[in-house]
Image (spheres, grey):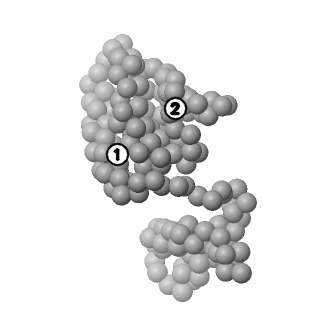
């Protein structure tokens, strides 16, 4: 009975917490609305969510997030330098096809989100068979090096986490 009313309790809790953190003030009305959102949204999306991600090595997630945080910080400075100081004629944008060794949809989503969160790169499309991501790079003088970095720095770590 409770599982039917609360199909994804962690998602519900996260939605309530995010709603409260993003609210301008804290009151009974805000809390009530947060609870409604936290209960209603998981019920609406429950038919579309599978059993959830299976993390084989969840203790590696903090290290992955640390690498991602460092890369986001570093990429922000790189993109700022490109935008502010690089002549447009020297810019080498590129489209990359990243072949995937990942098979779980949650792992592929995590990789696509990682690529998009890192300034200067954008995950644009997933192939029909789910075996490749299309990625745009703001500046990739050596596209193979960018591809290798995505595969070794992100995909291999996600493969360890998701199994």
Packing grade of label 1 (10 A; few <14, some 14-19, many >=20) is some
Name of the residue lying farthest toward the top: 89
Left or right, residue 84 beside residue 9 = left
Residue 67, position as x, y percentages in the image: 30, 45
Residue 142, position as x, y percentages in the image: 35, 17
Specify the quadrant of the image occupied by residue 72: top left
Residue drawn at x 31%, y 51% as measured from the top left: 63
Left or right, residue 92 beside residue 47 = left
Tell me, yes or no, if residue 124 can be seen here. Answer: yes
Q: Which residue is mark 2?
A: 100
Q: Nearer the viewer, mark 1 or mark 2?
A: 2
Tell me, yes or no, if residue 37 can be seen here. Answer: no
Residue 9, position as x, y percentages in the image: 57, 72
Q: Which residue is mark 1?
A: 68
For the residue labelled by badge 1, is the local secondary structure a helix, a strand or a loop? helix
Residue drawn at x 46%, y 77% as measured from the top left: 25
Packing grade of label 2 (10 A; few <14, some 14-19, many >=20) is some
- In depth, the one of 129 and 97 nearer the eye is 129
């Amino acid at each position: 009975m409770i599982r039917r009313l609360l199909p994804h309790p962690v998602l519900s809790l996260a939605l309530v917490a995010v709603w409260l953190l993003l609210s301008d003030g804290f009151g009974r009305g805000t809390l009530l609305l947060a609870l409604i959102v936290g209960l209603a949204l998981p019920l609406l999306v429950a038919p579309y969510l599978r059993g959830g991600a299976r993390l084989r090595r969840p203790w590696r997630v903090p290290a992955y997030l640390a690498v991602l945080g460092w890369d986001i910080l570093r990429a922000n400075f790189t993109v700022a330098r490109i935008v502010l100081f690089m002549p447009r004629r020297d810019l080498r944008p590129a489209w990359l096809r990243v072949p995937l060794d990942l098979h779980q949809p949650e792992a592929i989503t995590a990789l696509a989100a990682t690529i998009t969160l890192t300034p200067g790169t954008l995950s644009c499309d997933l192939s029909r068979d789910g075996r490749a991501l299309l990625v745009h790079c703001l500046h990739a003088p050596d596209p193979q090096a960018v591809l290798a970095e995505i595969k070794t720095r992100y995909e291999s770590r996600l493969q360890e986490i998701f199994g």
